[in-house]
Image: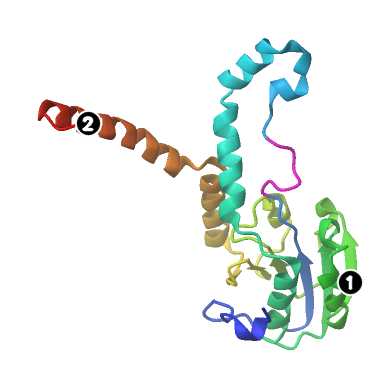
């Protein structure tokens, strides 16, 4: 769907980009394409029962469940959607120049061809997307998911006071101290699913208690 037909960017007030704009187009790093949860049975299959027991003791099933849910609820958007977001963001102002750094993991996507009409293109490895003392008046980071999972290290290198994030839910916001804290907290919840786990721990004894109560009252 083209960006003109979807919900407008959400933020009040919206930033007015001026001068030199550096855009960083990021891939999804929450789990897709990254190593799966550590499994001793997978690493040393010859040890058979020993490694299976190690997997059980290290809660492999739980860790797989957490990773699967993290990626499912991330609802990762395609590169074409990210390009749409960038087109909308550039319309917010009139930057004198636009440099777009593309995560190497996205470089082969056909949608990246549209970026050449928006600015100068640079393809870099994820670790090299952001340097120190970048010659830019504003930096806009575009994530394919709501939380920018896996990109905390990049955010540490973003300049104070002129960095913005545009996420997969079309929300654009300044990366100030409050936003950094909020992202850290939400990423922790996404990577641990602690709220669901705590709810499960509460539901099991509650269900057992209700079942016992029904049994005492003669209900099947």
Q: How far from the left and from the top, in percent, is residue 174?
A: 60, 69
The vertical placement of 48 against 115, above or below, is: above
How far apart are the alpha carbons under marks 1 and 2? 63 Å
Q: Where's residue 30, x and y in %?
A: 66, 49
Residue behind mark 1: 121
Q: Is residue 187 magenta?
A: no
Mark 2: give few (<14), some (14-19) or many (20+) Cα within 10 Å.
some
Q: Residue at x 82, y 61 (%)?
A: 106
Task: Identify which residue is drawn at 78% across, 13% down.
Answer: 46
Please give the range of residues in magenta.
30-36
Dividing the image into 4 quarters, which one contains the C terminus? Answer: top left
Could you tell me how many numbered marks the image carries?
2
Q: Secondary structure at mark 1?
A: strand
Residue 166 x/y as whole percent:
64, 69
- In this view, 208 is above or below 34: above
Q: Residues within 10 Å of mark 1 (few under 14, many from 20)?
A: some
In the rendered image, residue 70, in percent from the top left (x then y), is placed at: 58, 47
- Residue 123 found in image quarter: bottom right
Give the main secondary structure of the magenta stretch.
Answer: loop
Residue 35 lies within the magenta run: yes
Give the residue furthest to the front.
220
Between 162 and 150, the one lying in front of the other is 150
Kindly identify the residue that appears in the image at 71 percent across and 65 percent down: 78
Name the residue tied to disc 2. 211
Residue 139 at least partly seen: no
Instruction: Tell me where residue 38 sits by quadrant.
Output: top right
Q: Nearer the viewer, residue 34 or 88?
A: 34
């Amino acid at each position: 769907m083209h960006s003109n037909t979807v919900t407008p960017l959400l933020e009040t007030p919206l930033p007015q980009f001026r001068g030199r704009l550096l855009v960083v187009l990021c891939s999804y790093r929450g789990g897709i394409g990254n190593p799966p949860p550590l499994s001793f049975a997978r690493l040393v299959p010859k040890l058979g029962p020993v490694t299976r027991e190690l997997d059980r003791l290290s809660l492999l099933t739980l860790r797989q469940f957490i990773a699967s849910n993290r990626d499912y609820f991330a609802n990762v958007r395609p590169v074409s959607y990210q390009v749409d977001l960038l087109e909308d963001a550039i319309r917010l102002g009139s930057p004198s120049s636009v440099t777009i750094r593309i995560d190497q993991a996205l470089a082969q996507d056909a949608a990246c061809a549209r970026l050449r009409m928006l600015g100068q293109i640079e393809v870099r490895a994820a670790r090299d997307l952001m340097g120190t003392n970048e010659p830019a008046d504003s930096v806009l980071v575009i994530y394919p998911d709501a939380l920018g999972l896996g990109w905390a290290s990049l955010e540490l290198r973003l300049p104070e006071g002129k960095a913005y994030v545009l996420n997969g839910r079309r929300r654009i916001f300044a990366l100030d101290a409050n936003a950094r804290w909020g992202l850290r907290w939400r990423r922790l919840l996404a990577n641990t699913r602690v709220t669901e786990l705590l709810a499960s721990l509460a539901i099991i004894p509650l269900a057992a208690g209700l079942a016992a109560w029904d049994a005492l009252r003669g209900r099947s």
